[in-house]
Amino acid sequence: MIEAAHDLGVFVELAGEPRSGAELARALDADPRAMSVLLDALCAYDLLVEDGNARYALPAELRECLLPDGLFSLVGKIEYDRTLAWRAWRNLADTVRAGTRVEDGSDAPNQIGETEYRSLVHGINFWAPPIVNVLAGALAERGWTPRRPVSLVDVGCGSGIYSHLLLRRFPALTATGIDVRRIMPLALAQADRLGVADRFRPAVMDFWSEDWGLGYDLALFVNIFHLQTPASAEELLRRAAKSLAGGGLVAVVDQIVTGDAHSAQNRFSRLFAASMLATGGGGAYRTEDYDRWLDGAGLTRVALLDTPMHRVLLAGPR
Amino acid sequence: MIEAAHDLGVFVELAGEPRSGAELARALDADPRAMSVLLDALCAYDLLVEDGNARYALPAELRECLLPDGLFSLVGKIEYDRTLAWRAWRNLADTVRAGTRVEDGSDAPNQIGETEYRSLVHGINFWAPPIVNVLAGALAERGWTPRRPVSLVDVGCGSGIYSHLLLRRFPALTATGIDVRRIMPLALAQADRLGVADRFRPAVMDFWSEDWGLGYDLALFVNIFHLQTPASAEELLRRAAKSLAGGGLVAVVDQIVTGDAHSAQNRFSRLFAASMLATGGGGAYRTEDYDRWLDGAGLTRVALLDTPMHRVLLAGPR
């Protein structure tokens, strides 16, 4: 229903004044009765509110999610779902029959092409605020202050939302965001929007073959490890270890599975793994896997922090 | 994920002993890693349980829902979703654009064909027990006792589950179930299974043109009214009124919308209306609509009872 309302332009039409079902149907060239049924159903989920005079409004707290230009807009996610996720989930049984591994034992490339990745890169910004709260708290406990000049490298930064929110929390921080050329304009525009462009350095490169630079206080990987094979995960941690200053930390934000099957994070990781199975590629790794890879990279785990749907693993030199 | 597990045969395979992911993959000709991801995701929703030794089991309380021969099996609903609901929801925006009314002002015929209806007729049995509890309580308050010989006509009885559960509650009750020829074998088999076949009389007929009989203590309509137009709803109530014994009641179990927009039943009715919009046909009517139709049929509302997702309207002679 959210997708249908988005397709029809309901949310954008409600960005201004509340409107009646008839007004919306007229403006959006839809059937009045059918439009009312859809609007009422969105009200049942509190995604719209009706003012008692049969006029519908978009609640203020949902604008950032449901309008296309919101910082936490789900519009990219909606478009990704329309173009890719429906088919992938519909065909899940076939995927379970065939598996996703190709002959060399690695995962088949996932189905997310360039267009979907551009859609998705902003569409998952909504995860960032609670994760940045937890991470920033942990960094503050470890001596990051507003005045201390620190630096981070955000490997596969996407929209850069994690760097950008950390830059706002730590005014003397500078961040290097690594990603491919087609993504970087999105990250730069967002840095500008959030007023941190002067301390966000874009680094267009292939993070497998090129040099990340040296002397970082933090190497940050957000939702990067679930796309790795065990071999590539260890290699990433080796590269991270080499890039750190003395006392520097690695932060991995991801689905990180512990022994407690019933925690919210572990339940979510299982659903996320199923989603990755449906759309091809990726897996949710366990703390033991991370500990082994860290060991191979000369690092050791120093903290494992819960956020609503992810965990944050902090590691430092052994 | 439930559908994929059903398609693959996971639930049936787990009807016996707990099995490992590898055993299930082998038995069902699926990829072992992909199977494990699916099984773990089903555990995240408590639809399967893992015994700690990586063996998966189907919880006892879900067998009636997830196995094909359970009385409250969702298998028919799953098959309906696979063949019809996915496409209908995917195309919801187009449906809202075009509307569902055909030129004469009535709804377009819904997309549910014979095969889907047969699937669905058992697939919605799960709604019945809490509704029958509420209805049986109301009938007991109005003088139905285990020994009193009473009779009901169940108009559009489908699987007959409401009649059958009422027959179990009231040992001196007899029920006449009206439905089309292709459905009746399902109702008869279920009456037999529930041990009430001797008091369940099948009446294969078109309930618009043929005679329902006379002298019933209860005329029961479960999920019939949401498929009516206002004109056909009033006509059904006129026919019901004619079929009643002195002091007889009409019971309408359906989405019945009241003024309280935030009640669970009203929220559900809005989602149900959206579902009807997606698959074509039907609507959720308001108490005022029912009161007007009742008045036209010489009846008056005597009670409106809440069940978890439906309401039960009781009416008697004015």
Image (cartoon, coloured by chain):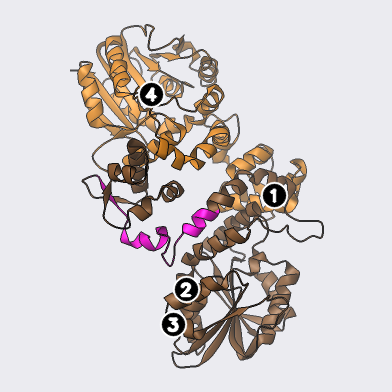
Chain colours: A orange, B brown
Secondary structure under tag 4 reads: loop
Task: Give yes or no for contact between labels 2 and 3 (Cβ–Cβ under 8 Å).
Answer: no
**Closer to us: mark 4 or mark 2?**
2
Is A119 displayed left or right of B99 in the figure? left
Amino acid identity at mark 1? Met
Task: Give yes or no for contact between labels 4 and 2 (Cβ–Cβ under 8 Å).
Answer: no
Amino acid identity at mark 4? Ile
Task: Give yes or no for contact between labels 4 and 3 (Cβ–Cβ under 8 Å).
Answer: no
Residue A250 at x, y percent in the picture: 29, 19
User: Where residue B221 is drawn, which disc sits there?
Assistant: none
Task: Determine the image quadrant of residue A148.
Answer: top left
Report, in whole angstroms, how far the alpha carbon at label 4 lies from the one at label 3: 59 Å
Is A8 displayed left or right of B9 in the figure? right
Report, in whole angstroms, how far the alpha carbon at label 2 lies from the one at label 3: 16 Å
- The residue pinned by badge 3 equals B169
For image coordinates 43% across by 67% down, the residue present is: B71
- The residue pinned by badge 1 equals A35
Q: Are marks 2 and 3 on the same chain?
A: yes
Residue B217 at x, y percent in the picture: 58, 88
- Report the residue that reaches farthest toward the right: B104
